[in-house]
């Protein structure tokens, strides 16, 4: 399915397709958010600026019917989801 998403993305915005297909890996997808891992802060920052996440979001909607938030991180670790406002997670 990811191949189909990339195919649609290449038709929407070629620079976004290049950035995602060459430099990103899907780390997590739970239906509400998709986390992409990039090898460097520069690549993750480049993806996060501008309309790159929106083009990927549109490709996900078109192929999978999935409308989710896109996050770019550095490395291969999925960040924890923030808890509800006013709560704090503490380890014991």
Image (cartoon, rainbow, N blue to C red):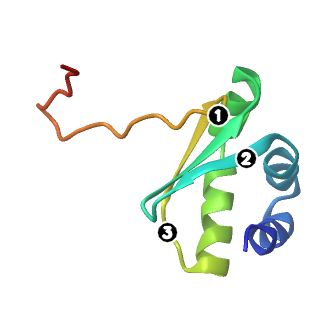
Q: Residue at x 52, y 38 (%)?
A: 78
Task: Residue 23: give x, y in percent of width and height.
Answer: 82, 40
Q: Of label 1 and label 2, which has the lower sequence position?
A: 2
Measure the C-alpha gap from mark 1 to mark 2. Answer: 8 Å
**Farthest left residue in view:** 86
Q: Residues within 10 Å of mark 1 (few under 14, many from 20)?
A: some
Which one is in front in this view, the residue at disc 3 or the one at disc 2? 2
The disc at residue 67 is 3
For residue 45, side relative to residue 68 (left or right): right
The disc at residue 76 is 1
For residue 67, side relative to residue 50 (left or right): left
Q: Residue at x 76, y 28 (%)?
A: 39
Q: Secondary structure at mark 2?
A: strand
Q: Residues within 10 Å of mark 2 (few under 14, many from 20)?
A: some
For residue 80, side relative to residue 13 (left or right): left
Q: Nearer the viewer, residue 91 or 59?
A: 91
Q: Secondary structure at mark 3?
A: loop
Q: Residue at x 72, y 34 (%)?
A: 38
Q: Residue under label 2, please give it.
A: 25
Q: Nearer the viewer, residue 73 or 9?
A: 73
Q: Residue at x 67, y 59 (%)?
A: 56
Residues at circles 3 and 2 in contact by the CB criterion of under 8 Å: no
Of the 4 image quadrants, the one containing the N terminus is bottom right
């Amino acid at each position: 399915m990811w191949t189909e998403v990339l195919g649609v993305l290449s038709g929407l915005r070629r620079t976004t397709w290049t950035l995602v297909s060459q430099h990103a890996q899907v780390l997590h997808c739970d239906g509400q958010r998709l986390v992409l891992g990039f090898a460097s802060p520069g690549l993750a920052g480049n993806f996060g600026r501008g309309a790159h996440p929106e083009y990927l979001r549109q490709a996900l909607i078109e192929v999978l019917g999935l409308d989710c938030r896109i996050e770019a991180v550095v490395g291969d670790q999925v960040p924890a989801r923030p808890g509800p406002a006013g709560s704090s997670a503490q380890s014991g």
